[in-house]
Image (cartoon, rainbow, N blue to C red):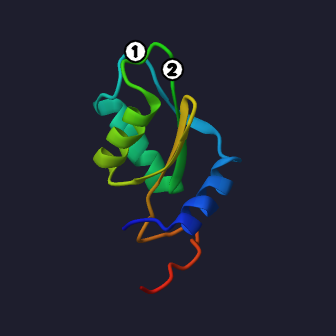
Amino acid sequence: MRLTSKQRAYLRSLAVNEDTILMIGKGGIDGDVVKQAADAIFKRELIKGKVLETAPVSPREAAEALAEQTESEVVQVIGSKFALYKRNEKDPKIVLPRAKKA
């Protein structure tokens, strides 16, 4: 599922108030980080992460790698922080604006 620009903007507005719950440090993106991200996305749908200066990856690389491994979408990357979103099909918490039919 691709997000529309309107949906992405809506998620960005929600992400502003989210706590940063995922930290990526010098260990980079390992199995523990991926599991932590996947669990948090499943519970919350929208999570924020931060890439510390000691990390071997850039915030953009970290966001894209985690999005791929957790099958989520990169909502935004600003500075050292990023936001990821994945809809929980069984128990959706966030209602996105409808995508226009093409």
Q: At numbered mark 2, what does the secondary structure look like: helix, strand or loop?
A: loop
Percent x, y for residue 7?
56, 66
Q: Amino acid at mark 2?
A: Leu
Q: In this picture, is 97 found above or below 61?
A: below
Residue positioned 36% across, 68% down in the render: 1
Q: Amino acid at mark 1?
A: Lys
Q: Is residue 69 left or right of residue 7?
A: left
Secondary-structure class at tag 1: loop
Left or right: 100, with 67 as reference point: right
Marks 1 and 2, how far apart at CA = 8 Å
Q: Which residue is mark 1?
A: 26
Q: Position of residue 40 (x, y in %)?
A: 47, 46
Q: Residue at x 69, y 47 (%)?
A: 16
Q: Which quadrant holds residue 78?
A: top right
Q: What x and y, as percent, mark residue 100? A: 50, 83
For residue 78, the mark is none
Q: From the image, tell me which residue sits under label 2.
A: 52
Q: Position of 83 compared to 14: left or right?
A: left
Q: Quick one: label 1 or label 2, which is nearer the N terminus? A: 1
Above or below: residue 40 compared with residue 81:
below
**Number of numbered discs on residues:** 2
Q: Nearer the viewer, residue 45 or 14?
A: 14
Q: From the viewer's perspective, is residue 96 above or below residue 29?
A: below
The reply to whether residue 93 is in sight is no
Q: Residue furthest bottom?
A: 101
Residue sitting at x 39%, y 66%: 2
The residue depicted at 28 percent of the width and 32 percent of the height is: 31
The quarter of the rendered structure image containing the C terminus is bottom left
Crowd class of label 2 (few under 14; some 14 to 19; many from 20; radius 10 Å): some
Asked if the residue at tag 2 contacts the one at tag 1, i.e. Cβ–Cβ closer than 8 Å, the answer is: yes
